[in-house]
Image: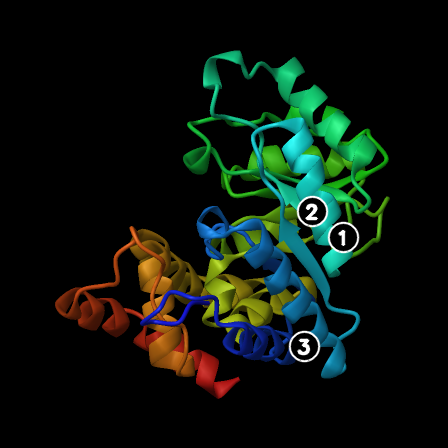
Amino acid sequence: MFDSKTEDVDLPTQQKHAVRLAKDGLVGLVVMGSNGEAVHLTPSERTSIIKATRSALDETGFKDVCVIAGCTEQSVRGTIALTKDAANAGADHAMILPPHYYRGFMSNDVIHDFYKHVADESPIPVMMYNYPGAVAGVDMDSDLMSRNAQHPNVKGAKFTCANTGKLTRFAAATNAISSKSTGKGVLAAGGMADMTVQTLVSGGSGVIAGTANVIPKFCVQVWNLAASGKLEEAIEKQKTLAHADWVLGRSGIPGTKSALVAFAGYGGVPRRPLPAMGKEADVAHLKELDEAFRIERGL
């Protein structure tokens, strides 16, 4: 969260947001992910956000809510440094994209070695973050991800590739946490709210979704309905959730922040060069979220 006038990090609002999400049922929070504008933050800002989030959760009785910190750098050395900073600031896990700037050199073996060397040195467990759209099209397949997860300090993956087949294969290969079993403690997380039911029936562990910043209770409701065996009701609810997820996804960070302002009264605007939403686009965007907002308010 940033001050709308100065673009300074707004730690009190960051803390308010974290506590709201925990109260609304989320069992873990990602900071410095894609919606968190990690690429727009200095190292000291990253540390301050982790510390502020962890302290806010602890002070309000949510010590069991884990904090997952984005720790992506292009080099092994730089990524290890970020994991150490994150651990010292109170993060429980590090979520890391594959290296991608030198795309032509990023073979499966190079990416495997990257995760291995980072996991060897990271003081906290590592999660892979598979998001081809953010990394020049680098898309780890299930064989590579399962191979990486053989390292004892690689404890999961987020599938923002939205490939449920890949998630299914990874969950099976790693004996991941599911709605029915703790497995071997590996997290196989869907990366978008519109794949919530699919993640659960594929043997996944849960969902890490940007949409949960705005309508967390609705996201939790769909998962819990499916997990309790009320699959038809979950599928019906997910139709609305999937539409909201698409509206927020296509409008990106500006749209998510606009929706937060409209629904929760805070959120601000992104850091430049990301633009704020224009007034006309904002009105149309929020109108499409009316039904999701109505459901969220009723929970």
Say above or below: 49 vs 74: below
Along the line of sight, the residue nearer the viewer: 217 or 104: 104
Q: Please state which of the two labelled residues, at mark 2 or mark 1, is closer to the viewer.
A: 1
Three-letter code for the amino acid on which mark 3 is drawn: Ala
Q: Quadrant of residue 145?
A: top right
Q: Residue 277 vs residue 234: left or right?
A: left
Give the mark nearest the N terminus, 2 or 1: 1
From the top left corner, tell me how far across and down residue 252 is, in percent: 34, 54
Which residue is identified by label 2?
Answer: 94
Q: Give the secondary structure at mark 1.
A: helix
Q: CA distance from mark 1 to mark 3?
A: 16 Å
The residue located at (50%, 50%) in the rendering is 38
* Residue 277 occupies quadrant: bottom left
Q: Which residue is mark 1?
A: 87
Q: Compare marks 3 and 2 and give the one earlier in the sequence.
A: 3
- What residue sits right under mark 3 in the picture? 56
- Which amino acid, by three-letter code, is at mark 2? Ala
Toward the viewer: 266 or 221?
Answer: 266
Whether residues under marks 2 and 1 lie with C-beta atoms below 8 angstroms apart, the answer is: yes
Disc 3 to disc 2: CB gap under 8 Å: no
Q: Could you tell me how far apart the alpha carbons at marks 3 and 2 are, in whole angstroms?
A: 19 Å
Looking at the picture, tell me which residue is in the foreground, 67 or 170. 67
